[in-house]
């Protein structure tokens, strides 16, 4: 039985949704560097779209330098790194993929919430904000739990389907919000009962905690996120280019 991916029939063209899904699979090691992606007929069945739509998605990735089409040889992955204007160092997930790991992400929830006075969310966004939750898997094992917080003004029209179709940061850029400055803070946290259940750990287990502040060029906060890493599974790595 064929597995089909559900696409959003909203304003965003289907070929761009498929392009983003394929790109995400390339960046997270589902389609390793040097391997061929599934054939066009297989992708047509998976996404339940026409040949023209699949070819449009593949052509976009060819033009961006991720794929190379060979006559009679399939379509090969020739690049698995994303360009970033924010830093000279490699993304953590890129390092893991280069080491042969597979990364998969799953959005869990997207909802408006009341912030608690005295918390960082309340200080940054006021009484309400939009909260997004996602889980990263490392080789199919739960590895990182993220909480993202954004202005409640972004809540209208944002669904989990939107987030599955493209990255959070691309969605923000489409709304004219550019991330020009990031600041990361690292610490240690004990796993709460909820986080322990999500990551498959014991309550109170030590976790690496990363807090990220994402701001625009004027210094306005766009996104605040907190990530909890199970470093027993994999250490956090940063590689710098000289």
Image (tube, rainbow, N blue to C red):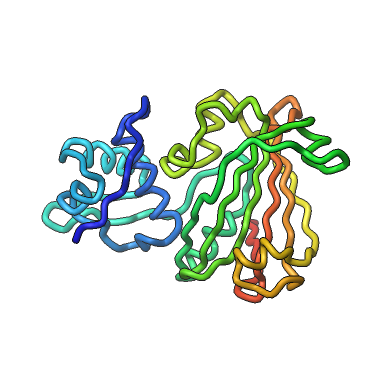
- Residue 162 % position (x, y): 45, 37
Q: Nearer the viewer, residue 100 or 18?
A: 18
Give the number of marks.
0
Quadrant in which residue 201 is drawn: bottom right
Task: Please report the residue visible at 69 percent of the width from the left and 46 percent of the height from the top.
Answer: 225
- Residue 158 % position (x, y): 52, 32
Q: In the visual, does 224 lie left or right of 66?
A: right
- Residue 22 % position (x, y): 35, 49
Q: Nearer the viewer, residue 108 or 87?
A: 108
Quadrant in which residue 48 is drawn: top left
Q: In which quarter of the image is the C terminus?
A: bottom right
Q: In the visual, does 154 lie left or right of 181?
A: left
Task: Please report the residue visible at 72 percent of the width from the left and 71 percent of the height from the top.
Answer: 203
Q: Is residue 179 above or below residue 39?
A: above
Task: Please report the residue visible at 33 percent of the width from the left and 40 percent of the height from the top.
Answer: 7
Residue sitting at the far right: 118
- Residue 120 % position (x, y): 81, 42
Q: Nearer the viewer, residue 80 or 191?
A: 191
């Amino acid at each position: 039985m064929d597995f089909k991916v559900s696409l959003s029939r909203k304003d965003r063209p289907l070929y761009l949704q498929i392009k983003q899904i394929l790109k995400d699979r390339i960046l997270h090691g589902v389609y390793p560097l040097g391997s061929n992606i599934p054939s066009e007929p297989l992708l047509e069945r998976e996404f339940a779209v026409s040949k023209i739509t699949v070819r449009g998605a593949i052509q976009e990735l060819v033009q961006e330098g991720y794929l190379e089409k060979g006559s009679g040889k399939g379509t090969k992955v020739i690049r698995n790194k994303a360009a970033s204007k924010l830093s000279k160092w490699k993304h953590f997930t890129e390092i893991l993929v280069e080491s042969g790991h597979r990364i998969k992400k799953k959005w869990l929830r997207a909802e408006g919430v009341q912030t608690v006075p005295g918390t960082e969310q309340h200080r940054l966004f006021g009484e309400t904000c939009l909260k997004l939750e996602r889980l990263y898997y490392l080789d199919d094992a739960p590895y990182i739990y993220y909480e993202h917080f954004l202005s409640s003004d972004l809540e209208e029209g944002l669904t989990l389907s939107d987030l599955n179709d493209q990255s959070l940061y691309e969605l923000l850029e489409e709304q004219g919000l550019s991330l020009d400055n990031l600041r990361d803070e690292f610490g240690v946290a004990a796993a709460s009962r909820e986080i322990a259940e999500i990551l498959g750990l014991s309550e109170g287990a030590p976790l690496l905690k990363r807090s990220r502040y994402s701001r625009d060029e004027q210094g306005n906060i766009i996104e605040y996120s907190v990530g909890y890493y199970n470093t027993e599974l994999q250490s956090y790595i940063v590689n710098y280019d000289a």
